[in-house]
Image (tube, rainbow, N blue to C red):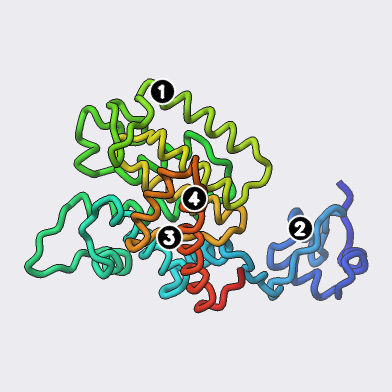
Amino acid sequence: MRYCSVIETAKKWNVSERSVRNYCAQGRVNGAFLTGKTWNIPENAEKPERSNKKKVQPVTLLEILQEEKASKYPGGIYHKTQIDLTYNSNHIEGSRLTHDQTRYIFETNTIGVENEVLNVDDVIETANHFRCIDMMIDDAKTALTEKLIKELHLTLKSGTSDSRKDWFAVGDYKKMPNEVGGMTTALPEEVAEKMKILLKEYNGKEKKNFEDILDFHVKFERIHPFQDGSGRVGRLIMFKECLKYNIVPFIIEDDLKMFYYRGLKEWDHEKGYLTDTCLTAQDKYKAYLEYFKIAY
């Protein structure tokens, strides 16, 4: 290994000799050491970045969500998304918690009620859903896999009364046949193969658009791979994939629930029902982004 002097390094890095000495003294030059009062600097040492270098500002919605999540920023788009997506997705599946109760759990990690009986599963699944959204933000750029989907279900259903039932598979595909809205779904022995085919088809598309994400959702819900929780997992996946491909996400609220169900049922004959419903929901999310001055 050849070592350079401060003078040589300063010329190579185009900085002052004083800056080089400061970098070395601060331990910011790997391999540099003192001999007496002389710094010996490896010839391949890289110039440290300036500590006051301007921080790159987040640009995409995903970057903003990641930054607000990391900093625990209150009152921003991350905060609103957590509460609204959790409340509405759980509400579609029968949760009796109010929007205010959902917000209170997110903001305080406590339950504040008077003269009211709450369902424990509703509370647990609300807290779990917050974690699921964090997973989708953290893993937004990763490929959609069976492993990720099962981990999402495990996170959603852990600690619930369902998790204590022998016939209920938490974090794994269903063991018992089930119907949804009077419609048959894939039999348990069919689920693994159908999921593999669906994911291979979806991941085979290089770049996904809005319709591709909806088409995956419809096929996922028709398989209905889990005993319970497939609807919420499916909507979380749509949220993740929208973030991945820089598409404005959307939240299906209660006033759109029946249109959403109709859209799922009629997709093969008329894609417009579900597309229009989700575009309406997307317009509302865009209004949130405009309020927070986030470009899209």
Percent from the top left, x then y, of residue 167?
23, 28
Is residue 123 something one can see in this rendering? no
- Between circles 3 and 2, the one closer to the viewer is 3
Compare residues 92 and 117 and report the one nearer the observer.
92
Q: CA distance from mark 1 to mark 4?
A: 23 Å
Of the image marks 1 and 4, the number of the one nearer the N terminus: 1
- Between circles 1 and 2, the one closer to the viewer is 1
Percent from the top left, x then y, of residue 168?
26, 32
Of the image marks 2 and 4, the number of the one nearer the N terminus: 2
Is 170 on the left or on the right of 141, as rendered?
left
**Is residue 95 positioned above or below 13 on the image?**
above
Q: Residues within 10 Å of mark 3 (few under 14, many from 20)?
A: many
Q: CA distance from mark 1 to mark 3?
A: 30 Å
Q: CA distance from mark 3 to mark 4?
A: 10 Å
Is residue 167 something one can see in this rendering? yes
Residue at the (38%, 53%) spot, across then down: 131
Q: Residue furthest front?
A: 269
Disc 2 target residue:
33
Disc 3 target residue:
251
Disc 1 target residue:
190
Compare residues 149 and 208 and report the one nearer the observer.
208
Of the image marks 3 and 4, the number of the one nearer the N terminus: 4
Q: Residues within 10 Å of mark 4 (few under 14, many from 20)?
A: many
SS at badge 4? helix
Image quadrant in which you'd find residue 144: top right
Dots 1, 3 in contact, CB < 8 A: no
Is 69 on the left or on the right of 8, as rendered?
left
Q: Amino acid at mark 1?
A: Glu
**Is residue 76 positioned above or below 96 on the image?**
below
Disc 4 target residue:
238
Residue 203 circle label: none
